[in-house]
Structures are given as structure tokens and as C-alpha cells.
Image: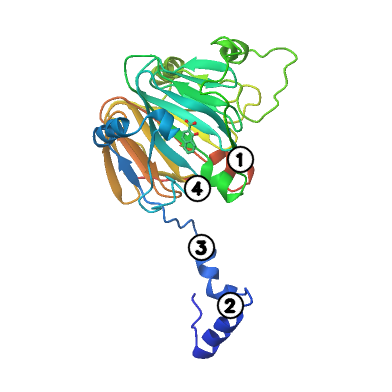
Amino acid sequence: MATPATPERQAFYDSIEGSNLAPLWERLHRLITREPVTPALPALWRWAEVRPYLMQAGGLITAKEAERRVLILENPGLKGQTSITHSLFAGLQLILPGEVAPAHRHSPAALRFIIEGEGAYTAVDGERTTMRPGDFVITPSWTWHDHGNDTEEPMVWLDGLDIPIVRLLDAVFAEPGEADAQAVTRPEGDSTARFANNMLPVDWQPAVKTSPIFNYPYDRTRESLEFLRNSDAPDPCHGHKMRYVNPATGDWAMPTIGTCMQLLPQGFATRPYRSTDGTVFVVVEGRGESRVGDQVFQWRPHDIFVAPSWAWVSHQAEDEAVLFSYSDRPVQEKLGLWREQRGNA
Ligand code: 1HN
């Protein structure tokens, strides 16, 4: 309960402010709430509405001049904060034919989730990977990365970064590259051969906390979901849901961002579910609707929506639907903070 600020008390608060002091009892109830309270709001970005703006940006600035031509998906409850939840960044990046996004590196880590176009590359620490729709690609913390589009079509992907987490900790570092494109030192497929075929080089030890696989291609993800759909009953809250894994540790693929892909069978309606990790969803396939808190979002492929921490979420798939999602769950788990709750109706 709020403590009444009598004139005497207020005079006292005013007098101590200059000494950089403040009364906790005036703020305690706003800091320590019975359950998570967030200014972040449920929100939906429709691809049909966003894509034309992205193409318009393509006519206004080059990828090189922008360094990264990205439209930020900013949570309407967090205006000006460059974030989609309190802990995560989301943006849509466009690279037009012939363009490069020059090499740089930074301590925030990034994921790319490919939305449109096929065949552009991203290079990470000397290895390129070709990107296709539905692929989940990782740029680990402090690795050199540049992107290029040698195809005839625009390429668009979702950038998910842990910037707000790294900023909270005041641990942001960045460095520009010497050349636009970094030297290619390993052939394409190198990391897949070494790490993505259920084997690891015998004496290899992980030096970092991020998965050594940097492209998790959609065709393999889709194949697993297809198999599960045919053999298992769907989970009442998740349908058929898989998490991306670091094969060297069994942990999440990234230390700060948890990533999942789920399939909802045609006509399937999930039971309400909530968890403390505010989550960004990308519609990969299908149409349907999701209730997030008090909002209902109707979605189709390439739409993106966000569920704030502890908001109830339920989905209904009209067609068979596939949703990619990411959140800060690995961080909360490490700190012993993560909670979930399954609803009934
Ligand atoms: C960044 O470096 C990339 O490398 C994308 O493609 C999005 C958003 C904020 C800060 C840096 C990229 C970014 C970013």
C-alpha cells in the first residue's frame, strides 16, 4: 500500500533529494509487485503493411550508408527505447541486389530469421552461409559479420538482438571492419560438417557459450515438425514445439536468446499459457489468430507479434501453422527466475 505523503514527510523527501537520497517506502510497492508488471504491450506487425515501408527505405538509403538498413519493431509501450520487449531488440533488415552491409563486430549477439528472398549470404568469422526462408542463423557476440546479396531479388530477414540486456549491464563494445567484406577463410558448409551432423571433432572443446552451428536450415527443422505431427499428440499449450540446441552443451543455441519452432495442426486451438520471458513470434506458415493478454491478433505468413512477460497467450491455427519464436528464457533460467503457468480453458 502507498504511504500517505504528509506535508512533513514531503518536506523531508525534498530535503534529502540534494544528498542523493530517497525514501524506499514511497516506491517499494511499485518495485516489488505480486507478479510481473511491464510497460511492454502486446503488438502485431503485419507483413502486408510493413513490407512496402521497408522497400521505401530501400529507395532512400543504401545498405552501405545505413551500415544496417533496419526498421526497428518498437514496442508501442516502450517508445524511443529501440526494443520489442524490455530485454530484446527486433528489426527487419533489407538488402537489395548487389548490396553489402559492411563488416563489423559488437558484444551484443544477433539472430537472423529469414523472411523473404533466397541466396544472399551472411559471413561470420570467415565463413559464409547462404540464407533461405525459415533459416535461423546466429551471429555470436564479438564475431565479425557482413552480409551481401548477389541475387536478383531483395532479401529480408528479422534481426533479433540482446542489445537491451547488454546495455543494462553497460557491456556494449563495437568495432568497424577494415574492409566491407571480410576475407573468406573457410568454405561454406564447414561448420555444418563439423558440428551439425550429430558428431563433434574428437578433441574439440567449446571456447564460447554459443552454438558452433551458425545456420539451422528450415528444411531440417520442418522435417522434424512434420514427423512429430504424424506421431505425437500435440501438447495442449504448444502444439508440437522444439527448441534449437547447442550440440556441444545441450543448452540453448545462444546464451542470451532462446529460440523455438512450433507446429500447430490445422484447426488446433492451444490452451492459455504464460511465462516470464516476453516472446517474439514470427509466422512462418499458415494463418490463424492468437490472443495475447486482452488483444486478439489475426495473422498470416511473415507477420510478427510480441507477447509481454506473464501475458496469457493462446493460439488458434486456421491452416496448419508454423511459428518461430525467441525470448530471453536462457538468461532467466540461469538466474533461477524463469516461471511458466499453464491455463485450463
Ligand atoms: C546489427 O549489427 C545488425 O549486423 C542488425 O546485421 C541489426 C540492430 C542494432 C544494432 C546492430 C547486423 C542491428 C545491429
**Percent position of residue 291, x then y:** 31, 44
Q: CA distance from mark 2 to mark 3?
A: 25 Å
Mark with earlier residue (3, 1) = 3
Q: Nearer the viewer, mark 4 or mark 2?
A: 2
Name the side, left or right, on which 49 lies relative to 336.
left
**Percent position of residue 30, x then y:** 50, 66
Q: Nearer the viewer, mark 2 or mark 3?
A: 2
For disc 4, the neighbor class at 10 Å (few under 14, some 14 to 19, many from 20) is many
- Disc 3 under 8 Å from ligand 1? The reply is no
Q: Which residue is mark 1?
A: 173
Mark with earlier residue (4, 2) = 2
What kind of element bears circle 3?
A: loop
Mark with earlier residue (2, 1) = 2
For disc 3, the neighbor class at 10 Å (few under 14, some 14 to 19, many from 20) is few
- Check if mark 2's residue and mark 1's residue have beta carbons within 8 Å: no
Observer-nearest residue: 93 or 100? 100
Q: Which residue is mark 2?
A: 17
Q: Which residue is mark 3?
A: 33
The residue most toward the bottom is 8
Q: Nearer the viewer, mark 4 or mark 1?
A: 1
Give the amino acid at mark 2. Answer: Glu
